[in-house]
Image (cartoon, rainbow, N blue to C red):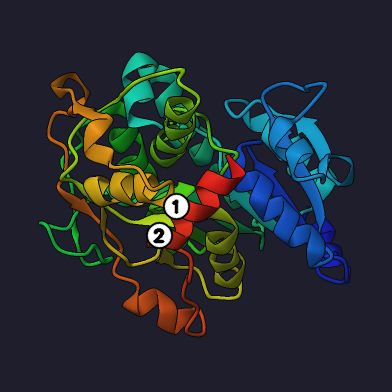
């Protein structure tokens, strides 16, 4: 097995394996293809059509393979046969709300599958770089910007419970010598996101109001503050991170935007007064919801060659509205 990996290093064409066929994986695939990478994308089952990849017009340039994240032998087999230099673990339930509906699936996909991968890589004594997607929601910024020095929260959902365990797991395997990373994402927006994602939901609702299909939008806590980034731009940060030594890194914009301002910007873009069309409904309030979840990008920008996202705020809203 060690001979297999030493030969792998001699190959000029770089190969990456992306675990999960979701939105972030699709954008990363598109970016890496332009860099000349070969791409393998794994999914729980083989589909006739992968919508995210089809919309980005890259479906034919990617090899899709079925993978059971809970089967270590299956994982070992695909790693040995495909010989990737990079593995991006983007599988998992990514909605806090959804995690309450399927806690077991949330735990298995966000933690147990990653654990199986890391154990296999350790068994193979592999030089592969392994990247685990995580979330800024696992940190408590105490109403300040979040940094890697921020304390971890006490788990308040099946999602944060699984991701905190995964975050600590990556640190443990890194201390054992594996080349593993935690990518701490904040809110990532894209027209490919499901319609339930906040900014896309607002943009689509405005269009429905204009077409007289609905009269109002119901929303939850408009005073919470988030870090909304543009997916194709954040993905460049993921790529640049692969050039670093194993570490944890925050990937966001570092810019604050309240839910209220987000709604206002979207309506203003269509020259509409949001107060006429928005209703607060307390049933959408989340228990123990943090007021502010925003990245401190000082350290990340230094490590990534002063890389900084430029699309946020009004610019992000306009891009979302015009592409939804």
Q: Quadrant of residue 119?
A: top right
Left or right, 87 with reference to 119:
right
Q: Which residue is labeled 1 in the image?
A: 317
Q: Nearer the viewer, residue 68 or 311?
A: 311
Q: Residue at x 44, y 52 (%)?
A: 317
Q: How many marks?
A: 2
Q: Is residue 169 visible?
A: no
Residue lying at the far top in this picture: please name it: 101
| Residue for badge 2 | 314
User: What residue appears at the point 59 percent right and 66 percent down from the top-left corner?
Assistant: 236
Q: Where is residue 155? Give x, y as percent.
A: 20, 36
Q: Residues within 10 Å of mark 1 (few under 14, many from 20)?
A: many
- The answer to which quarter of the image holds residue 41 is top right
**33 on left or right of 305:** right
Whether residue 55 is situated above or below residue 140 in the rendered picture:
above
Q: Residues within 10 Å of mark 2 (few under 14, many from 20)?
A: some
* Most foreground residue, 203 or 25: 203
Is 6 on the left or on the right of 132, as rendered? Answer: right
């Amino acid at each position: 097995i060690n001979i297999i990996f030493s030969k792998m290093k001699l190959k000029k064409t770089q190969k990456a394996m992306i675990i999960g066929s979701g939105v972030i994986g699709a954008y990363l695939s598109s970016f890496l293809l332009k860099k000349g990478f070969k791409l393998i994308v794994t999914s729980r089952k083989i589909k006739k059509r992968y919508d995210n990849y089809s919309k980005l017009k890259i479906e034919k340039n990617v090899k899709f393979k079925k993978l059971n994240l809970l089967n270590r032998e299956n994982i070992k087999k695909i790693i040995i046969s495909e010989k990737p230099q990079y593995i991006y673990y983007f599988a998992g339930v990514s909605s806090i709300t959804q995690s309450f509906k399927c806690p077991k699936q949330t735990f298995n996909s966000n933690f147990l599958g990653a654990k199986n991968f890391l154990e296999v890589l350790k068994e193979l004594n592999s030089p592969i770089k392994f990247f685990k997607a995580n979330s800024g929601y696992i940190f408590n910024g105490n109403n300040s910007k979040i940094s890697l020095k921020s304390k971890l929260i006490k788990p308040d959902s099946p999602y944060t419970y699984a991701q905190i365990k995964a975050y600590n797991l990556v640190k443990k395997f890194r201390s054992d010598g594996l080349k593993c990373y935690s990518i701490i994402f904040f809110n990532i927006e894209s027209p490919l996101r499901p319609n339930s994602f906040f900014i896309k939901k607002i943009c689509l609702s405005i269009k429905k109001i204009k077409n007289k299909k609905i009269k109002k939008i119901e929303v939850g806590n408009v005073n919470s503050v988030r870090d909304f980034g543009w997916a194709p731009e954040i993905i460049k940060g993921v790529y640049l991170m692969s050039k670093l030594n194993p570490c944890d890194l925050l990937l966001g914009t570092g810019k604050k935007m309240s839910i209220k301002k987000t709604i206002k910007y979207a309506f203003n873009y269509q020259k509409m007064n949001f107060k006429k069309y928005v209703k607060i409904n307390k049933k959408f309030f989340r228990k123990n919801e943090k007021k502010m979840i925003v990245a401190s990008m000082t350290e990340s920008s230094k490590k990534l060659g002063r890389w900084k996202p430029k699309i946020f705020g009004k610019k992000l809203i306009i891009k979302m509205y015009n592409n939804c």
